[in-house]
Amino acid sequence: MTADTAGTPPPAAATQGTLPLQTCLAWGLGTVAVAALFNSVNVLLLRYVVDYAGISAVLAGGLIAASKLYDAVIDPLIGAASDRTRSSMGRRRPFLLAGSVLLAVAALMLFNVPGGGGALSIGFLVLSLIVYATGYASFSVPYMAMPAEMTSSLHERSRLISFRVSAVAVASLLAVFIGPQIMTFAGGGRAGHTALSVFLAVVVLAAGFACFRGTRDAPFHYQPAVKATWAEKARSLAGNKPFVVLLVVKLLQLMALAVTQAAMPFLFQRVLKLGDARMGIYFLIFYGVMICVQPIWVRLARMRGKRLIYMAGTLLYGAIYVSWYFVSADEPLVAVYGRAVALGAMGGAVLLFGQSLLPDTMEWDYRRTGMRREGMLSAVYTLIEKLAYALGAALTGIILGKTGYIQNAAHGVQPASAIEAIYWLASFIPFGFLVLSIVALCFYDLDESKFAQAENGQGAA
C-alpha cells in the first residue's frame, strides 16, 4: 500500500482502449451477486417473516423500512472509505470481497429467522437486516464506482454497463423463477425458504468472487476527492432540476414496483390459490418479455421522443395492474400469464427510460457546473431506489396489518378485509403511484433542443 500514487491519472491507453471481454463479463457478474438477493428480499421476505416467523405485518414492514435509515449512513461512509483505500488491488476490489461474504451470510440469516414472533424473532430479523445493508453497501457502492476508473471512453462505458443490464435480468430470473422452484422442491414452508437461502448464498459467493478475480487486471487510479460540505453538495445537486424531477419520478415508480412485488406472493397464495412454482413461471414470462421488447422501445423513442413514450408506457403499465383487482381463484392460467406478458412489455419501457434519463441528467450537470461527478449523482439515485423499496414494503405491511391480516397463518383463512387489501395492493395503489409519476414527468424538460441551446452558448439553467 502506498500513498504517493494519490492523484496520479491512469495511463491513457489503459482507460481509452477497448476493455477485454472477460473483464466486462466479470464486472457484469457482480450485479448477479447483489441483484439476486435484492429481488428475493423484495418479493419474498415480507411474506416469509409474517407467515413463517410470526412477526406482525406492520412491525415487519416497519423494520424493513427503518433499515434504510442505516443505509443512508453506511452508503456514504463506504464510498468515502473506498476512495481513501490504498491497495495494489485497487480502491474498490477489496470491498467486493468483503461485501460478497457479508451478502452470503445475510442470505442465510434473512430466510432463517426463528419462528414465534417474539423478541428472538424480531432481534434476529433486525440483525439480519443490518448485515444485509452492510454487505450490500460494501459491495454495491464501490462496484458502481469502478466503471469511471476502468475506462474514460463514453462509448466504452456504455458497452460495459450493457453487461450489467443483462446481468440484472439473469439475477431476476434466478431470484423469482429458479428460487421458487427450489422452494417448492424442498417442500415449501420454512424448509423451502432455508433451501432458497442456501441457493442464494452460493449464487452470491460465486458471482462476487468471479467479479473480484475477473477484474484483477482492470485499470484503476487514485485522485483527490472534491472537498465540500454536505450542505454545499446538496445545494449544488438541487440546482439540477431534471435530476431532481427524475428522483421524484423514480421514487414514485419504484414504490409502485415495491408494493406489487411484496403483494404478489400474497395474491398468488391467498387470492389465486397458486403455489410458488406458478408464481416463478409468472416472473419468468415477465422478465423474459421485458428483455425481448427493448429494441422496440428504443426505436419508438427515436421516433417520438423519450419522455412521451415513457409517459405512455407508464400509463399502460399502471392500467394493466388495475386488472388484478378483478381476478379470482378461478382465473384461467392463460389470463394470469397474459398479464405477465403485458406487464413485462410495459415494464420494459418504464425500466429502460427511467435508467436512460439518468446519464442525460449527469451530462446536464456537467454542462451546468463544469464538474464530472457522476459517482455522486449515482449514489443519490441508488439511495432513492433503496428508500422507495423500503417505503413500499412498509406500506404493504401497514395496510395488511391494519386490515386484519393474521400473521403466522401460512395456510389459514384470512378475513375478507385483508383479502380486499391484497387486491388493492396489487392494483389501484401501484396505479396511483404511477399516475403521480406521470404528473412529475410533465416537469422534466431536458431534451435535445435544450442541450443544443447550451451548446450554442445560451446557458444551462
Image: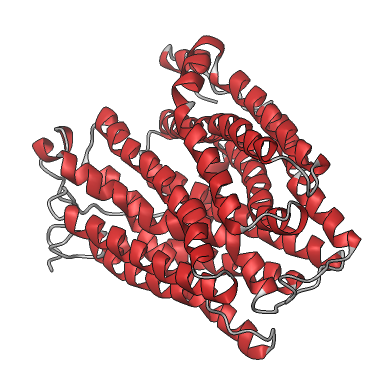
Relative image position of residue 242 (x, y in whole percent): 57, 32
State which quadrant residue 400 falls in: bottom right
**Observer-nearest of 170 and 13:** 170
How was the colour assigned to the protein in this rendering?
secondary structure
At 70% from the left and 62% from the top, the residue drawn is: 394
Q: Which of the pair 274/146 is nearer the observer?
A: 274
Image position, residue 213 (x, y; %): 18, 59
Residue 457: % across, % down: 44, 15
Question: Which quadrant of the structure image shows residue 95?
Answer: bottom left
Residue furthest right in the image: 416
* Quarter placement of the C terminus: top right
Residue drawn at 59 percent across, 39 percent down: 244
Residue drawn at x 53%, y 80% is 127
What residue is rendered at 18% in x and 45% in y? 23
Foreground pick, 302 / 71: 302
Is there any visible trace of residue 226 in the rendered image? Answer: no
**Location of the N terminus (image quadrant):** bottom left
Residue 11 seen in this snapshot: yes
Is 202 left, or right, of 322 in this rendering? left
Q: How many marks?
A: 0
Q: Is residue 142 above or below residue 447?
A: below
Residue 93 locus on image (x, y percent): 24, 60
